[in-house]
Protein backbone atom coordinates (compact mmCIF):
# COMPACT_ATOMS: atom_id res chain seq x y z
CA UNK A 1 0.00 0.00 0.00
CA UNK A 2 1.33 3.37 -0.92
CA UNK A 3 1.93 6.01 1.69
CA UNK A 4 -0.61 8.29 -0.01
CA UNK A 5 -3.29 5.60 0.28
CA UNK A 6 -2.49 5.04 3.95
CA UNK A 7 -2.72 8.76 4.68
CA UNK A 8 -5.94 9.14 2.69
CA UNK A 9 -7.58 6.22 4.48
CA UNK A 10 -6.50 7.53 7.88
CA UNK A 11 -7.81 11.03 7.10
CA UNK A 12 -11.14 9.52 6.04
CA UNK A 13 -11.29 7.44 9.22
CA UNK A 14 -10.50 10.42 11.45
CA UNK A 15 -12.99 12.62 9.61
CA UNK A 16 -15.66 9.99 10.16
CA UNK A 17 -14.79 9.79 13.85
CA UNK A 18 -15.08 13.56 14.15
CA UNK A 19 -18.49 13.51 12.47
CA UNK A 20 -19.66 10.72 14.73
CA UNK A 21 -18.46 12.52 17.85
CA UNK A 22 -19.98 15.84 16.81
CA UNK A 23 -23.24 14.15 15.86
CA UNK A 24 -23.37 12.42 19.22
CA UNK A 25 -22.61 15.64 21.11
CA UNK A 26 -25.33 17.57 19.26
CA UNK A 27 -27.91 14.74 19.16
CA UNK A 28 -27.69 14.73 15.36
CA UNK A 29 -28.30 11.07 14.52
CA UNK A 30 -27.84 11.60 10.77
CA UNK A 31 -24.36 13.07 11.24
CA UNK A 32 -23.44 10.40 13.78
CA UNK A 33 -24.52 7.63 11.38
CA UNK A 34 -22.72 9.31 8.47
CA UNK A 35 -19.53 9.37 10.53
CA UNK A 36 -19.86 5.70 11.40
CA UNK A 37 -20.39 4.84 7.73
CA UNK A 38 -17.36 6.89 6.72
CA UNK A 39 -15.21 5.05 9.25
CA UNK A 40 -16.47 1.70 7.98
CA UNK A 41 -15.69 2.68 4.39
CA UNK A 42 -12.16 3.67 5.37
CA UNK A 43 -11.73 0.33 7.14
CA UNK A 44 -12.82 -1.56 4.03
CA UNK A 45 -10.36 0.42 1.90
CA UNK A 46 -7.57 -0.30 4.39
CA UNK A 47 -8.40 -4.01 4.33
CA UNK A 48 -8.35 -4.06 0.52
CA UNK A 49 -4.95 -2.36 0.49
CA UNK A 50 -3.66 -4.90 3.03
CA UNK A 51 -4.78 -7.73 0.74
CA UNK A 52 -2.95 -6.09 -2.16
CA UNK A 53 0.19 -5.81 -0.02
CA UNK A 54 -0.04 -9.46 1.03
CA UNK A 55 -0.47 -10.58 -2.58
CA UNK A 56 2.55 -8.52 -3.61
CA UNK A 57 4.61 -10.06 -0.79
CA UNK A 58 3.62 -13.56 -1.91
CA UNK A 59 4.47 -12.73 -5.53
CA UNK A 60 7.82 -11.27 -4.45
CA UNK A 61 8.51 -14.39 -2.39
CA UNK A 62 8.15 -16.58 -5.44
CA UNK A 63 10.31 -14.29 -7.54
CA UNK A 64 13.34 -14.74 -5.29
Image (cartoon, helix red, strand yellow):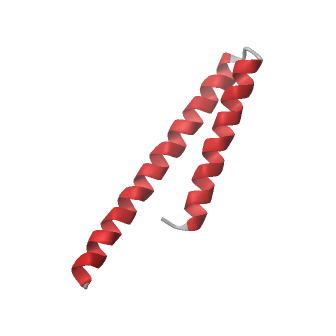
Residue placed farthest to the top in the image?
27
Q: Is residue 27 left or right of residue 52?
A: right
Left/right of residue 38 with respect to residue 51 in the rendered view: right
Residue 60 location in percent, x, y? 30, 78
For the point 62% across and 29% down, which residue is it?
34
Task: Please state the total of marks drawn on the protein image.
Answer: 0
Residue 61: image location, x then y, percent: 26, 77
User: Where residue 32 appears, x then y in whole percent?
Assistant: 65, 24
Q: Position of residue 38 (x, y in %)?
A: 58, 37
Kindly give the residue lying farthest to the bottom in the view shown.
Answer: 64
Locate residue 40 relative to residue 60 in the image: left or right: right
Taking depth in this image into account, of 57 and 19 the one nearest to the observer is 57
Residue drawn 42% across the image and 50% down it? 47
Is 25 above or below relative to 15? above
Q: On screen, 63 above or below 37?
A: below
Give the side of residue 43 with respect to residue 11, left or right.
Answer: left
Examine the image and state in which quarter residue 55 appears. bottom left
| Residue at the extreme right of the image, as rendered | 26
Q: Quadrant of the C terminus?
A: bottom left
- Please tell me in which quadrant of the rendered image residue 21 appears: top right
Q: Residue at x 62, y 55 (%)?
A: 8
Amino acid sequence: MGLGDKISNKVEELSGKAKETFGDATDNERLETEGQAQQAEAGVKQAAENVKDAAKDVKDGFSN
